Amino acid sequence: MRWLLASLSLVCALAAAPATAQETRAELLAQQRAERAKDTAPYEPNPVERGLLLVDEHRIFDRLAGGLYGFYPRVGGFPTGSGLAGGVGYRKAIASGQWAFDAGAAASTRGYKAVQLATGLPRLFNGWVEVGAAWTWRDHTQEDFFGLGASSALDARTSYRLRGHELSALLALRPFPWLTAGSRIGLLHDDVLAGTDGALPPIHAGFTEATAPGLSRAPRLGYHRLFLDVDYRDERSNPRGGGRYELSWGWYDDRQSGAFDFGRTDVELLQIFPIFDKKRQFVVRVQSSHIEAESAARVPFFLMPSVGGSESLRGFREHRFRDANYVLINGEYRWEAFSALDLALFFDAADVAPHWDELTFRDLKTSWGVGFRFNTNRHVFLRLDIGAGGREGTRFFLKFGPAF
């Protein structure tokens, strides 16, 4: 009996020893983890990161863009090449935000000026429907014109002034946050005057109505445009994933003589391919426009699409090539260098032609370069792009906001 009891005691001790040792090791590991946790301080953002977080928290750039109510400063808003621009605006919500009113004025360092009044019902039927109207007066003082076509010469550069106004109305349907479809109608009238850039000859010295349609008599146009916009980017002003696809078609009617009746189709495809937790992205954008005049009618030169400048072909001057049809391809590789700064390598290619079937991929104008984008999580607030490869010198573009 004693032998049996001794044997049972020995078995129990042997069985308990591993458990006791295991518990001891577990306690030791837990103690070590606790000690390491004490030694590891929580991450503290640096002063730059704290400042950017504060900007996002108080929605500073939303106020700059007029996205919030009350008085706000306006930054930019003019065509590429206008110089640094700024102004002031006021936006007010009425009837619990169902009705909105927005008024603003801005000017640039190169004398560009604009005044805009807009009103509408932006959130009808729980945001499914938007109705609006707007009036804009503009004076673009130093627009460049090199002539029409892909073979236009750099030394043919002239300056013109485009001054006029536009009245428009909008009806948009938004069944999903990423889908907008609608229609816009309006009246458009601009006058072409001599540009104010004293370093360049005025447009009338180098071109005529035959080589620059609409130069001697800018038409009064009525237009009706239909559009479809699919936008599922993660952020509108600093996207790191998603895409945007836009299609629009419109008809422009010369209300005086019919000499400038034409239709226009525009397509834009943008896709962002994020890698490494969105710290790096490949971005591809394709844009194209097709304008076709009716019978013997013509298209005003200042309403034709152009490529060149900070948002398209960055190795060339603003509006360097212009014609009734164009195709543009942009490619970028972006990566986060450190907080508040992204770097980018880009490549641009484009072609313009008077007729759609004359666009080819054999004679593309190309450029390449490097970009610096100062940003918060939600906004690019300053961008420097350095473009080259266009055989017309190196171009520097300093802009407030993203390229695309």
Image (tube, rainbow, N blue to C red):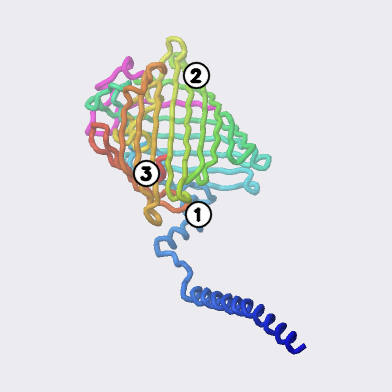
Q: Amino acid at mark 1?
A: Arg
Q: Quick check: can you spot residue 237?
A: no
The residue identified by callout 2 is 253
> Residue visible at 31% across and 17% down?
211
Secondary structure beneath label 2: strand
Which region shows up in magenta?
184-213
Furthest residue to the right?
1
Secondary structure beneath label 3: strand
The residue identified by callout 1 is 59
Q: How much space separates mark 2 and mark 3, taking CA atoms?
A: 32 Å
> Residue visible at 47% across and 18% down?
262
Q: Earlier in the sequence, mark 2 or mark 1?
A: 1
Residue 379 percent coordinates (x, y): 45, 49
Q: Is-magenta flag for residue 189?
A: yes
Disc 3 + disc 1, Cβ < 8 Å: no
- 281, above or below 377, in the image: above
Secondary structure beneath label 1: loop
Name the mark on residue 85.
3
| 389 relative position to 271: left or right | left
Please name which of the two marks, 3 or 1, marks the residue nearer to the observer: 1
Disc 2 + disc 1, Cβ < 8 Å: no
Front-most of 389 and 38?
A: 38
> Residue visible at 51% across and 32% down?
246
Q: Is-magenta flag for residue 74?
A: no
> Picture quarter containing residue 151?
top left
Residue 290 percent coordinates (x, y): 44, 21
